[in-house]
Image (cartoon, helix red, strand yellow):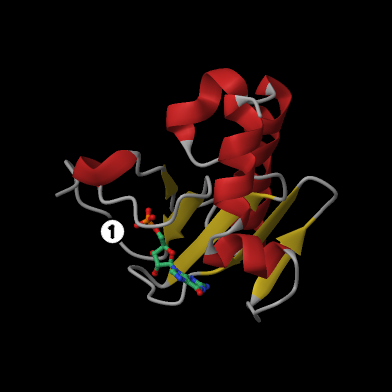
């Protein structure tokens, strides 16, 4: 088995893999053939949406093994979500936590789309 397919298998085992497969519910706000966006269970801002690929990739630590067009697609989906959520005028943030020090808890790539309040910088 290649490293890429092993990673795909691992990330499909996560809770986000179960959401992609429809095995557990999620409050889905956007979806298309390549990705899914749903509200975070533990929101850190008035709008807190997670954008994830349907395909399993464990995180940006595997970006060099992913289809670059998929990574771009996720960024465009984040913008679509931000527009839908009415964040375009005041601004919004995309966060990707990578690995332990960054606090990544789910090994399935996800973009946090945050907005609806003033976001401090630098992040903690
Ligand atoms: P991370 O810390 O890996 O960057 O982000 C994982 C995020 O997933 C967290 O913000 C957490 O609240 C969210 N989360 C974990 N499990 C679930 C779930 O079952 N459903 C939803 N909607 N969000 C989840």
- Confirm or reject: label 1 Cβ below 8 Å from ligand 1: no
Seen from the viewer's position, the closer of residues 77 and 119 is: 77
Q: Is residue 75 visible?
A: no
Number of marks present in the image shown: 1
State which image quarter holds ligand 1.
Answer: bottom left
Residue 41 on image: x %, y %: 45, 77
Q: Is residue 26 visible?
A: yes
Q: In this view, does 53 lie to the left or right of 15?
A: right
Q: Is mark 1 on a helix, strand or loop?
A: loop
Q: Is residue 34 left or right of residue 9?
A: right
The crowding category of the residue bearing disc 1, from other C-alpha atoms within 10 Å (few below 14, some 14 to 19, many at least 20), is few
Find disc 1 in the rendering and name its residue.
118
Seen from the viewer's position, the closer of residues 113 and 71 is: 71
Residue at position x 19%, y 42% from top? 101
Residue at position x 51%, y 49% from top? 110
Residue furthest toward the top? Answer: 64
Residue at position x 59%, y 37% from top? 6
């Amino acid at each position: 088995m290649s490293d890429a397919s092993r990673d795909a298998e691992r990330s499909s085992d996560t809770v986000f893999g179960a959401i992609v497969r429809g095995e557990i519910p999620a409050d889905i706000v956007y979806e298309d053939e390549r990705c899914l966006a749903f509200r975070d269970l533990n929101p850190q801002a008035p709008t807190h949406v997670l954008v994830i690929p349907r395909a399993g990739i464990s995180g940006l630590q595997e970006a060099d093994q992913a289809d670059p067009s998929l990574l771009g697609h996720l960024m465009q989906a984040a913008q679509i979500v931000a527009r839908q959520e009415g964040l375009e005028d005041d601004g919004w943030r995309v966060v990707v936590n990578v690995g332990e020090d960054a606090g990544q808890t789910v090994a399935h790539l996800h973009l946090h789309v945050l907005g609806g309040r003033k976001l401090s910088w630098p992040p903690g």
